[in-house]
Amino acid sequence: MTMKSPLEFFRTLPKKTCPECGEQVEEQAESYFMECERCLAKKGE
Ligand SMILES: [Zn+2]
């Protein structure tokens, strides 16, 4: 058994995907949105 460091734990988390288009979304600390930037921009209009 090996202890995984917290950093490694987060690295193994599955990538977030945009529910709108299925695009992989880069995790952003400041952002709570699920959608990718493109879909967010669309919604903002
Ligand atoms: Zn999207």
Image (cartoon, rainbow, N blue to C red):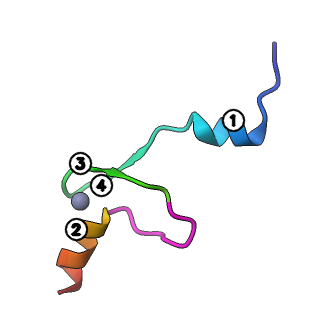
Which quadrant: the N terminus? top right
Q: Amino acid at mark 2?
A: Cys
Which quadrant: the C terminus? bottom left
* For residue 15, above or below residue 20: above
Q: Are marks 2 and 4 in contact (CB under 8 Å)?
A: yes
Q: Position of residue 21 (x, y in %)?
A: 19, 54
Q: In this picture, which residue range is highlighted in magenta? A: 28-35
Q: Are marks 4 and 3 in contact (CB under 8 Å)?
A: yes
Residue that numbered label 3 is attached to: 22
Q: Secondary structure at mark 2?
A: helix
Q: Is mark 3 within 8 Å of ligand 1?
A: yes
| Disc 3 residue crowd, few under 14, some 14–19, many 20+, Cα 10 Å | few
The residue that appears at 26% across and 54% down in the rendered structure is 19
Residue that numbered label 4 is attached to: 18
Question: In terms of sequence position, does the residue under pointer 2 or pointer 3 come before the other?
Answer: 3
| Disc 1 residue crowd, few under 14, some 14–19, many 20+, Cα 10 Å | few
Q: Amino acid at mark 4?
A: Cys
Residue that numbered label 1 is attached to: 8
Residue that numbered label 2 is attached to: 39
> What numbered label is drawn on residue 37?
none
Of badges 3 and 1, the one in the foreground is 1
Q: Is mark 2 within 8 Å of ligand 1?
A: yes
The residue that appears at 63% across and 42% down in the rendered structure is 10
Q: Are marks 2 and 3 in contact (CB under 8 Å)?
A: no
Q: CA distance from mark 3 to mark 1?
A: 25 Å
